[in-house]
Image (cartoon, grey):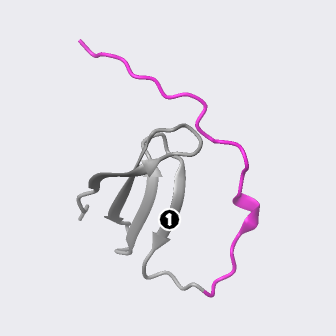
Amino acid sequence: MTKKPDQQIQGYCEKCEAPVFLNSSDDQYGNTVITLNCWNGHYKWINIEGIESNLPMDREGEVSASLVKRISFFKIS
């Protein structure tokens, strides 16, 4: 079940100046996932409820550059 996002602007992204929104949804395992992010995919923070906090973090997956190079839209007629 997907929860409705909070449509109030919580601020603006430091990277791209897009509006930042608070979103809440459920993942495939039933955990509640709460994020604060802009619409371009830059995350301020992510909180996953139901995950054990004492598990070791995998630092190898971290990247410093943005993974999204370009987003474009087109009209389907």
Residue 7 picture location, percent across and down: 27, 51
- Residue at x-position 28% and y-position 57%: 6
Residue 74 picture location, percent across and down: 36, 17
For mark 1, give the secondary structure: strand
Q: Label 1, on which residue?
A: 46
Q: Residues within 10 Å of mark 1 (few under 14, many from 20)?
A: some
Say which of 36 and 9 sits in front: 9
- Does the magenta stretch mainly form a helix, a strand or a loop? loop
Quadrant where the N terminus is found in the figure: bottom left
Location of residue 64 with respect to 6 vertically, above or below: above
What stretch of residues is rendered in magenta? Answer: 54-77
> Residue 30, located in which quarter of the rendered image?
bottom left
Residue 48 picture location, percent across and down: 46, 73
- Total numbered labels: 1
In the image, 21: left or right of 13? left
Quadrant where the C terminus is found in the figure: top left
Q: Is residue 15 magenta?
A: no
Amino acid type of the residue tagged 1 in the rendering: Ile
> Residue 55, located in which quarter of the rendered image?
bottom right
